Amino acid sequence: MKILVTGAAGFIGSHVCLYLIARGNDVVGLDNLNNYYDVSLKKARLERIQKFARGALKENIYEGAQTSAIGMGSFSFVKMNLEDKSGVENLFALEKFDGVINLAAQAGVRHSLKEPFDYIDSNISGFLTILEGCRHNKVKHLVYASTSSVYGTNTNMPFSVENPADHQVSLYGVTKRANELMAHSYSHLFGIPTTGLRFFTVYGPWGRPDMALFLFTKAILDGRPIDVFNSGNHKRDFTFIDDIVCGVVCAFDNPATPDPAWNGNCPSSCSSTAPWRIHNIGNGNPVELMDYIAILEDCLGRKAKKNFHPMQPGDVVETSASVETLHAQVGYKPSTPVELGIRKFIDWYKEYYGL
C-alpha cells in the first residue's frame, strides 16, 4: 500500500511513519515545517525516518509491535501546506494513495488564544483539501486526528464517544469537532470510509516542546521553576506514544463501515449509516498532575521548584478516555504505565540533548 501521512515531521506523525515503513508500506510524508516550535527537532525526526527507510538506522522500532509485512517500505517527503489547494490536489493525482492518515494540524489550546486564524487555515481549510483529495482519487480509508478537547465542559467521566460533544472551550477543540462533522458529510455523500481518533495527552520520546512533560523536564534540569496551573488540581489521561501508534495503525487497517444498528430516532454519536466512525484513543487510566510530576522528579533525581498559577483559559480540569469502541473494533489495549513512559522520555531527552 502507498499511504499519505500528513504531519510527518510531527511527534505522532513521525512515529506512525516509522511503524508503517517497518511493516513494508510505502509512505509519502507531508509537512510544512512551520515554526510553531523548534524546526530543528522536526528536521531531526525526518532524518530519523529517512535513515530508517534506507536501512541505516538499526534501532528496534516499536518493540513487540505486530507488523504484517515481510520487508521494509519506502519513504519520500513533500514540504507543503495543507491549505495549498492545487498542490495537494496534484499530489493526490500523482501518487494515487491507497489510504491517508491525516495528523497535520495547528495544535495547542493556548496558541489558539493568540493566533486563531492559524487554526482555520490549517485545521479547517487544510482538512477540506484532504477530504477533496480522498473524494476524487478513490482513497480506501481516511484516518484523521481529533482530540479530547472536543469534550469541552463535559464532566461525565470517562469521556465516551457515545456522548454528545457540543460545548468546546477552545477554538482548537472547535476546529477538531468541525473535522469530525466535515468527515461525516463526505462519508455520507461520497461513501469515503473515515475514522476520527480523539487523542488524549500523548507523551514520549521525540515529543513536542510545548507540552508539559517536555517543559517540566527542561526547567527542572535547568534549575528553573515549573509552571503548574490550576494549583496542580488537574488530572490527565496520559497516553504513551507507542500505544497511540499501534492504535492509529490498527484503526487504519480496519476501514470504517456503516453501522447497521444506527437509528435516527436514537442516534449514536460515534457511528452512522455512512462509513464513518469516531473513537477515543487514550490510556484509560487518568493520573493526577502532581503524581505525574512526582514520577518525573524521581526519574530525574531532582525536586522541582513549582510556581502555582490559576486555571488557564480554554483548559479543562480532567480528561479520562473510555476506549471501549476502539478495543471492540481493533483490539486496542494500551499497556505502558506512566512510570515506564516517563523513563523512556527522559532517556531520549538526555541522549538527544547530549546531557
Image (spheres, rainbow, N blue to C red):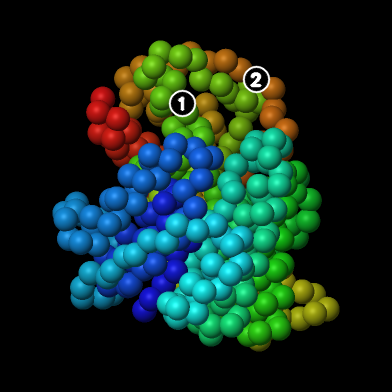
The image quadrant where one finds the N terminus is: bottom left
Secondary element type, mark 2: strand
To which residue does mark 2 refer?
Answer: 309
Q: Nearer the viewer, residue 299 or 106?
A: 106
* Figure check: 88 above or below 82: below
Can the viewer see residue 83?
Answer: yes
Q: Nearer the viewer, residue 297 or 60?
A: 60
Q: Which mark is residue 2?
A: none
The image quarter in which residue 180 lies: bottom right
* Figure check: 143 above or below 292: below
Left or right for 58, reference 198:
left
* Residue 340 image point, x, y percent: 33, 40
CA distance for labels 1 and 2: 15 Å
Can the viewer see residue 158?
Answer: no
Q: Please identify the residue farthest to the right as the structure is shown.
A: 265
Q: Residues within 10 Å of mark 2 (few under 14, many from 20)?
A: few
Q: Nearer the viewer, residue 139 or 126?
A: 126
Residue pictured at 75% horizontal, 44% vertical: 169
Residue pictured at 78% horizontal, 56% vertical: 166
Q: Mark 1 or 2 closer to N-term?
A: 1
Left or right for 343, reference 182:
left
* Residue 264 image point, x, y percent: 80, 80
Instruction: Residue type at mark 1: give it.
Output: Phe
Residue pictured at 62% horizontal, 63% vertical: 127
The image quadrant where one finds the C terminus is: top left
* Figure check: 183 above or below 109: below
Instruction: Residue type at mark 2: give it.
Output: His
Q: Which mark is residue 216?
A: 1
